[in-house]
Image: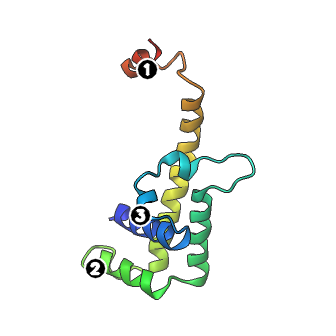
């Protein structure tokens, strides 16, 4: 259920806040969302900031209705919308922390301790 809540909030953010078009949304990738060039704010940072605003100022009626509809008749039914937002914020921050070192590792190329068949094939 958490993934569905995360998806709803991310979809709302992309379409309403960043105004990513439907066509653009089909070609987005993790690098676009997480990668931080020096001096640039990433979409993930904007997303976390937007989630913070929701936690401080509250969730709009439209977004709250979407969340309520999503969690109706589940164990999360009755949980405050801000608590659902907090769960998403915690999840995206954990994902960001896990993604960054992996991205650096992948950009630096195969490491001698990486002995997977896929890496060996790529280096041939």
Counting residues from the start of the chain, the first of labels 2 and 1 encountered is: 2
Q: Position of residue 43 (x, y in %)?
A: 58, 58
Q: Position of residue 47 (x, y in %)?
A: 56, 64
Counting residues from the start of the chain, the first of labels 3 and 2 encountered is: 3
Asked whether 19 or 83 is in front, the reply is 19
Element type at marker 3?
helix
Judged from this view, the residue extending furthest toward the right is: 39
How many marks the image carries: the answer is 3
Judged from this view, the residue extending furthest toward the left is: 73
Up the image or down, 68 lies above or below 49; here it is: below
Residue that badge 3 annotates: 22
Asked whether 10 or 100 is in front, the reply is 10
User: Which label is found at residue 119?
Assistant: 1
| Cβ atoms at labels 1 and 3 below 8 Å apart | no
Q: Few, some or many C-alpha atoms within 10 Å of disc 2 (few <14, some 14-19, many ≥20)? A: few
User: Which label is found at residue 72?
Assistant: 2
């Amino acid at each position: 259920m958490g993934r569905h809540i995360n998806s709803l909030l991310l979809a709302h953010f992309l379409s309403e806040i960043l105004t990513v078009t439907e066509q653009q949304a089909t070609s987005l990738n993790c690098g676009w969302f997480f990668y931080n060039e020096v001096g640039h704010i990433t979409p993930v940072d904007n997303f976390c900031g937007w989630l913070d605003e929701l936690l401080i100022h509250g969730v709009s009626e439209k977004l709250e209705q979407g969340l309520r509809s999503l969690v109706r008749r589940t164990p999360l039914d009755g949980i405050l919308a801000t608590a659902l937002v907090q769960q998403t914020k915690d999840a995206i921050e954990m994902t960001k922390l896990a993604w960054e070192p992996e991205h650096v590792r992948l950009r630096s190329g195969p490491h001698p301790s990486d002995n997977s068949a896929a890496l060996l094939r790529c280096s041939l």
